[in-house]
């Protein structure tokens, strides 16, 4: 009597093979390049150029890491990348949340409504379009350095972040805020103690987007930062790519070192990324 | 753009002495009666040839250690266009000289170096290579530092095994190809997938062997918008024969040439999969990565029936310049003088397979490129046509079309039409 029932229950949980195969294929598109990156970085120079990307490194050779470390002056470039990224993430989350709060709670006023649209327009403004004037401007005001990149990056990140924050803020019931007001909270206290903590999942999403955008960015730091000693990782890594020579082992070792923080950050925050994406989607 | 590049710095420069003065004042205040350090000039030196970075890093360290007047910082990553636009370009540049760089010179962004004694040591034929791109009236803005000479690279062992002599006429070359083919060897290893390899290789060699490239370009420049089927010079008239020669040679390539890129080519050639390879010295280092023992040599591609009419293709691998916007021109010149010392230049060229640009340069010693020395010394060289026309015209892709079976006269007519349209726009 029991056996068939159990089989029935198992049957209900039967594996969905179609989905499984599709998901496995999707996983491959991530895992294969990752495998090539890791194995390439461990190959010797002659093995790296032999045209077999998928072969296992034999012998395992760590000299690529040493060369990449030295050629890019890795610790300095890494710290600068980290500084720019941290500045951008903190700035974007803080300014984005403040601006969105102000906009959502004053939606009935024209000034706020229009400033929302104004901030959104930056979504349609790619950096290359305004690159030339920005280079001159940052040069004139002494911001041709990582700080200038942070300011510009926050500006460009702000529009998308505000879009996410405002959608999320609209789902927070006004009654919550009213109760805080009745307890005597000022606007700042309401924001600091109530709204900002409630925004946490969305802040995580915004932070991750800002992190990826600034960590991986090549063009803006390359054009804005004048002193090559203050360049970010992606820019100093560009020396590995030329028309005439291939140093796959050195470049992949370098890419791997640069990728590590992004992967680590994602591992720890992926839960919030998914939550954040779905939470803003449906208005409460 | 040129005006902004030269006037903007004035305002930026205006503040620099102030800042410097403030810095010096602070330094003095803290250092008290310390050693005299106020006279040090800081300059940046832009050099971005990746394989040469360690070499120049050591050179810069030596220079900084040897004297106290000038402190050089090696810059390998900053963006040149942004630097010029911002008004703080590097004080000394040592770069590949090409069409892109020539645009800065043409607009007067590079300072005159003709009064430096170093300028007189440059071979006139080599200095002329700079002028073939663009000139700025009354200035010698760019000093050639190293020349890369390119011709047909061949596998010595394969040639010897088949009893083949280096061909000196077009007919001999075709005979060699036929012979190799009969022997079951791929005569030419080609990599059509990367169009530039065709442009700087087969096409430039075929054109350079029979056409006076600078003369052709000068006339094309003059005719400008009128270039077409009836003009005095045109691609469809003057380049037709070399293009057909290129096609004829391309047919001796490996069967899978269309799907092979530069990297594949280096590996395959290193493994003896072809007898000849149309690449410059930059490929030699890449081939050596796979097979350092391989014996290689070079010969200029013969494109006529006159064995004395042979030339090699050259390009300015590195050239020195000092921008107008530099605030430390004197210090920059001091460093240029250091770089231009004959033994420093010779050492660079020996290590990176370059040819010297000065009258007293040492000859090359690397077996693989020695055969080109006599042509280089005799001035029998040309800059590749495919690298001498504006980047707006996708010449490499047109060449790829012709090499892989496209209609040659029609494609050349398209290039002429592009040229005329570009001249009209300019």
Image: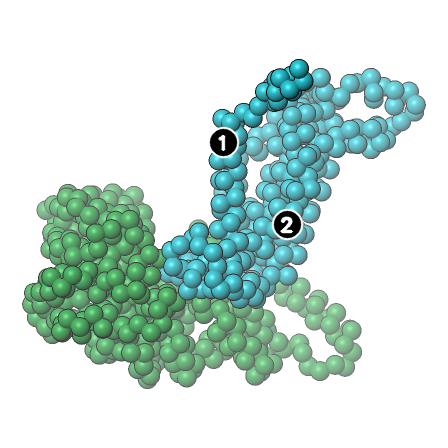
Where in the figure is residue B261, as x and y percent of width and height?
Answer: 32, 53
Please, what secondary structure does the residue beneath circle 2 have?
Answer: helix
* Residue at point 38%, 81% (across, down): B346
Chain letter matching colour cyan = A
Where in the figure is residue B321, as x and y percent of width and height?
Answer: 43, 68
In the rendering, what colour is chain B? green
Q: Chain of mark 2?
A: A
* Distance from the alpha carbon under mark 2 to that under mark 1: 30 Å
Identify whether B203 is placed above or below A100: below
- The structure's colour scheme is by chain
Residue with the mark numbered 1: A21
Camera-side residue of A218 and A71: A71
Confirm whether residue B102 shows in the render: no
Where in the figure is residue A248, as x and y percent of width and height?
Answer: 45, 58
* Residue at point 63%, 66% (across, down): B17
Please, what secondary structure does the residue beneath circle 1 have?
Answer: helix
Is there one chain holding both mark 2 and mark 1?
yes
The residue most toward the front is A1
Residue with the mark numbered 2: A261
* Label 2 crowd (10 A; few <14 / some 14-19 / many >=20): few
* Label 1 crowd (10 A; few <14 / some 14-19 / many >=20): few
Residue A75 sits in which quadrant?
bottom right
Identify whether B399 is placed above or below B153: above
* Residue at point 64%, 29% (across, down): A277
């Amino acid at each position: 009597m029991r056996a068939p029932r159990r089989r029935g229950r198992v049957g209900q949980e039967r594996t969905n093979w179609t989905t499984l195969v599709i998901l496995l294929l999707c996983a491959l598109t991530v895992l294969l390049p990752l495998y090539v990156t890791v194995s390439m970085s461990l190959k010797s120079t002659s093995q790296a150029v032999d045209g077999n990307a998928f072969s296992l490194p034999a012998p395992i050779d760590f000299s690529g890491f040493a060369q990449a470390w030295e050629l890019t002056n890795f610790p300095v470039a890494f710290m600068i990348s980290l500084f720019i990224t941290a500045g951008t993430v903190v700035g974007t989350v803080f300014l984005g949340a403040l601006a969105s709060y102000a906009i959502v709670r004053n939606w009935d006023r024209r000034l706020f409504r229009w400033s929302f649209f104004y901030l959104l327009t930056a979504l349609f403004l790619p950096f290359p379009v305004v690159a030339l004037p920005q280079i001159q401007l940052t040069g004139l005001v002494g911001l041709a350095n990582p700080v200038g990149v942070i300011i510009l990056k926050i500006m460009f990140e702000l529009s998308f972040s505000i879009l996410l924050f405002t959608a999320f803020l609209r789902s927070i019931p006004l009654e919550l805020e009213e109760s805080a007001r009745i307890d005597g909270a000022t606007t700042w206290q309401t924001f600091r103690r109530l709204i900002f903590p409630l925004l946490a999942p969305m802040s995580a999403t915004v932070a991750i987007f800002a992190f990826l955008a600034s960590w991986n960015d090549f063009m803006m730091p390359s054009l804005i930062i004048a002193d090559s000693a203050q360049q970010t990782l992606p820019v100093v890594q560009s020396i590995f790519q030329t028309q005439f020579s291939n140093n796959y082992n050195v470049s992949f070792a370098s890419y791997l070192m640069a990728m590590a923080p992004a992967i680590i950050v994602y591992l720890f925050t992926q839960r919030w990324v998914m939550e954040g994406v779905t939470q803003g989607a449906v208005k409460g | 753009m040129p005006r902004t590049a030269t006037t903007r710095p004035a305002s930026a420069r205006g503040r620099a002495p102030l800042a410097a003065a403030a810095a010096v004042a602070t330094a003095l205040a803290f250092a008290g009666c310390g050693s005299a350090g106020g006279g040090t000039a800081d300059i940046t030196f832009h050099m971005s040839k990746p394989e040469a970075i360690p070499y120049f890093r050591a050179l810069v360290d030596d220079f900084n250690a040897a004297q106290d007047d000038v402190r050089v910082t090696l810059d390998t990553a900053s963006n040149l266009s942004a630097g010029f636009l911002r008004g703080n370009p590097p004080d000394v540049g040592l770069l590949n000289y090409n069409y892109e760089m020539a645009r800065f010179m043409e607009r007067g962004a590079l300072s005159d170096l003709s009064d430096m004694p170093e300028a007189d040591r440059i071979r006139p034929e080599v200095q002329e290579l700079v002028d073939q791109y663009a000139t700025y009236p009354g200035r010698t803005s760019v000093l050639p530092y190293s020349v890369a000479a390119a011709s047909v690279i061949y596998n010595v062992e394969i040639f010897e095994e088949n009893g083949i002599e280096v061909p000196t006429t077009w007919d001999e070359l075709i005979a060699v190809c036929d012979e190799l083919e009969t022997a079951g060897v791929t005569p030419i290893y080609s990599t059509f997938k990367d169009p530039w390899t065709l442009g700087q290789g087969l096409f430039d060699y075929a054109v350079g062997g029979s056409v006076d490239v600078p003369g052709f370009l000068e006339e094309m420049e003059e005719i400008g918008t009128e270039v077409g089927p009836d003009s005095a010079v045109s691609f469809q008239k003057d380049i037709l024969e070399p293009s057909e020669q290129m096609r004829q040679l391309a047919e001796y390539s490996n069967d899978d040439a269309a799907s092979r890129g530069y990297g594949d080519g280096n590996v395959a050639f290193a493994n003896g999969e072809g007898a000849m390879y149309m690449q410059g010295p930059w490929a030699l280092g890449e081939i050596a990565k796979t097979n350092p023992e391989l014996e290689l040599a070079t010969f200029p591609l013969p494109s006529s029936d006159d064995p004395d009419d042979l030339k090699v293709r050259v390009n300015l691998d590195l050239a020195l310049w000092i921008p107008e916007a530099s605030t430390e021109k004197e210090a920059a010149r001091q460093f240029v003088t250091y770089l231009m010392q004959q033994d420093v230049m010779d050492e660079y060229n020996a290590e990176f397979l370059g040819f010297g640009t000065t009258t007293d340069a040492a000859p090359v010693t690397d077996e693989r490129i020695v055969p080109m020395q006599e042509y280089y010394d005799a001035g029998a060289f040309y800059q590749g046509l495919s690298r001498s026309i504006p980047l707006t015209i996708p010449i490499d892709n047109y060449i790829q079309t012709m090499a892989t079976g496209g209609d040659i006269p029609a494609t050349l007519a398209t290039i002429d039409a592009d040229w005329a349209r570009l001249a009209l726009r300019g």
